[in-house]
């Protein structure tokens, strides 16, 4: 028997995906902020990739200066609201809280961050404005967290910024690739609207830069280009049966779920292959969509999984069953996938019958795009090489996010985008002196 009923309406869908970090009310925020010790050498700040002044914004919340708290957050992280929801705070800021050393619950930093940023968004209170027009135009390829963060920072510095996005919505994996219990489509897009309305960067949707002619048009008309490409489609395993109907990539699965919600019909038996956080999301989502049986199968031990422990616990709580030290040999079936054959580390084999196979086996790099930029160096893993200013080997090209770090958190992309913008500014200024 499935742990969750199949959602038949949007309200059913939201019931199956309740927020992991529900919004605090005023009393909860006042009490929680009162617990902070305001550490002088706050380890939570060091643990945050964007180094938000966490003690300051918590004190601002406690003293009633919620707008000031939101400004403190956004000055460091343009994805302040989204990161409060989707960041693995247990591993970052909250994991570093000094209360952990005293067996006391750490400060609920993520939810306090949401409280402050939600307040300004709901009141539509502008916190920033574009800098005076400096006469320079910058192009950004990709409207994911790195690209949006770059755009925001450049607008504050007075640049005319145009983002070229292949899809029809901004914020990248925040809206297309994150589990709905972390952040909803509406929440992710509301923050994008909030930022764009204040700062006025322009986004050209359904505008992929996928030919040399389009790329040349960009380089001819803009003084610098930021590459916020992200990663590509789910990588292939290279096993028999992988091209059968009923076999999908985890990234593509999560995107379809995010876009279609309850209209997506999940069959009774699902096998998810992989051991990263995306695998956990895909498995948990399958169970929450009413699948009777969901197996999560990983080739190594549980201790060697790339996923955070709390993500695996979330999947188990949804009814997912974990199988370890088993590598996929083949996907079985004639007209569609009906089972996956696995090999244990002791050499024995076994089959798991299923109606849907979800491959959470990593994403391919954007190799096809990079073929148009032969002067940009890649490392041995196909990642774009950048210097400390996020400048590539082609001086007018900068890059950040997953195409540079190989796949990290939203907060890492936001940090890299902000710093790339400062690198672009330095580059443009050096040319005009």
Image (cartoon, helix red, strand yellow):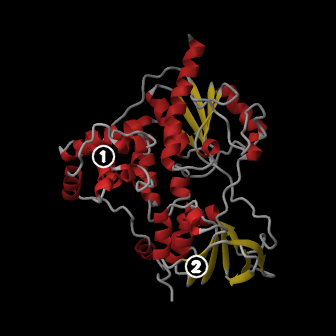
| The quarter of the displayed image where residue 249 is located | bottom right
Location of mark 2 (residue): 294
Q: Secondary structure at mark 2?
A: strand
Residue 108 shows in the view: no
Vertically, is 79 above or below 419?
below
Query: On the rendered image, what quadrant is the C terminus found in?
Result: top right
Instruction: Please give the name of the residue rendered at 51% of the width and 27% of the height, measured from the top-left corner.
Output: 422
**Contact between labelled residues 1 and 2, with CB atoms less than 8 Å apart:** no
Specify few, some or many for label 1: CA neighbours under 10 Å numbering under 14, 14-19, or 20 or more: some
Left or right, 152 with reference to 117: right
Badge number at residue 319: none
Is 356 or 306 nearer to us in this picture? 306
Q: Residue 128 location, x and y as percent?
A: 36, 34
Q: Position of residue 413 (x, y in %)?
A: 53, 43
Disc on the earlier residue, 2 or 1: 1
Name the image quarter holding residue 64: top left
Query: Which residue is at 31% across, 49% downward?
Result: 98
Q: Nearer the viewer, residue 66 or 164?
A: 66
Mark whose residue sits in front, 2 or 1: 2
**In the structure shown, which secondary structural element does the residue marked by tag 1 occupy?**
helix
Q: Position of residue 342 (x, y in %)?
A: 73, 76
Which residue is identified by label 1? 120
Question: Which residue is depicted at the point 58% across and 79% down?
Answer: 294
Can residue 248 be spotted in the picture?
A: yes
Against 319, residue 144 (above or below) is: above
């Amino acid at each position: 028997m499935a742990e969750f009923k199949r959602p038949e309406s949007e309200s059913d869908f939201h019931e199956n995906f309740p927020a992991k970090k529900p919004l605090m009310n005023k009393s909860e925020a006042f009490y929680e902020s009162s617990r902070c010790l305001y550490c002088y050498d706050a380890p939570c700040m060091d643990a945050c990739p964007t180094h938000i002044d966490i003690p300051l914004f918590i004190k601002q919340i406690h003293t009633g200066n919620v707008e000031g708290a939101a400004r403190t957050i956004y000055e460091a992280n343009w994805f302040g609201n989204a990161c409060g929801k989707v960041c693995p705070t247990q591993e970052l800021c909250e994991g570093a809280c000094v209360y952990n050393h005293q067996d006391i619950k750490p400060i609920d930093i993520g939810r306090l961050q949401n409280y402050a940023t939600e307040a300004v968004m709901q009141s539509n209170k502008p916190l920033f404005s574009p800098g005076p027009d400096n006469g320079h135009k910058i192009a950004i390829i990709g409207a994911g967290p790195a690209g949006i963060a770059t755009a925001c920072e450049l607008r504050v510095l007075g640049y005319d910024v145009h983002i070229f996005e292949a899809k029809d919505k901004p914020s990248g994996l925040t809206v297309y690739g994150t589990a709905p219990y972390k952040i909803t489509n509406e929440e992710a897009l509301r923050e994008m609207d909030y930022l764009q309305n204040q700062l006025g960067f322009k986004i050209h949707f359904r505008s992929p830069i996928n030919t040399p002619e389009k790329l040349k048009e960009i380089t001819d008309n803009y003084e610098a280009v930021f590459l916020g490409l992200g990663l590509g489609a789910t990588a292939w395993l290279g096993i028999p049966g992988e091209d059968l109907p009923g076999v999908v990539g985890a990234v593509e699965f999560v995107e379809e779920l995010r876009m279609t919600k309850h209209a997506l019909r999940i069959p009774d038996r699902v096998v998810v292959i992989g051991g990263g956080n995306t695998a956990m999301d895909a498995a948990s989502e399958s169970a929450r969509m009413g699948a009777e049986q969901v197996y999560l199968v990983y080739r190594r031990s549980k201790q060697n999984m790339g996923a955070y422990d709390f993500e695996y616990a979330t999947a188990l709580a949804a009814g997912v069953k974990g199988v370890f030290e088993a590598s996929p040999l083949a996907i079985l079936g004639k007209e569609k996938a009906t089972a996956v054959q696995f090999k244990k580390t002791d050499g024995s084999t076994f089959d798991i019958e299923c109606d849907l196979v979800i491959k959470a086996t990593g994403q391919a790099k954007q190799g096809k795009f990079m073929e148009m930029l032969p002067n940009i160096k890649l490392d041995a893993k196909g990642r774009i090489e950048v210097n400390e200013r996020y400048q590539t080997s082609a001086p007018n090209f900068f890059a950040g996010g997953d195409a540079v770090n190989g796949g990290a958190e939203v907060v890492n992309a936001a940090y890299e985008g902000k710093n790339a913008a400062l690198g672009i500014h330095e580059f443009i200024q050096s040319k005009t002196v």
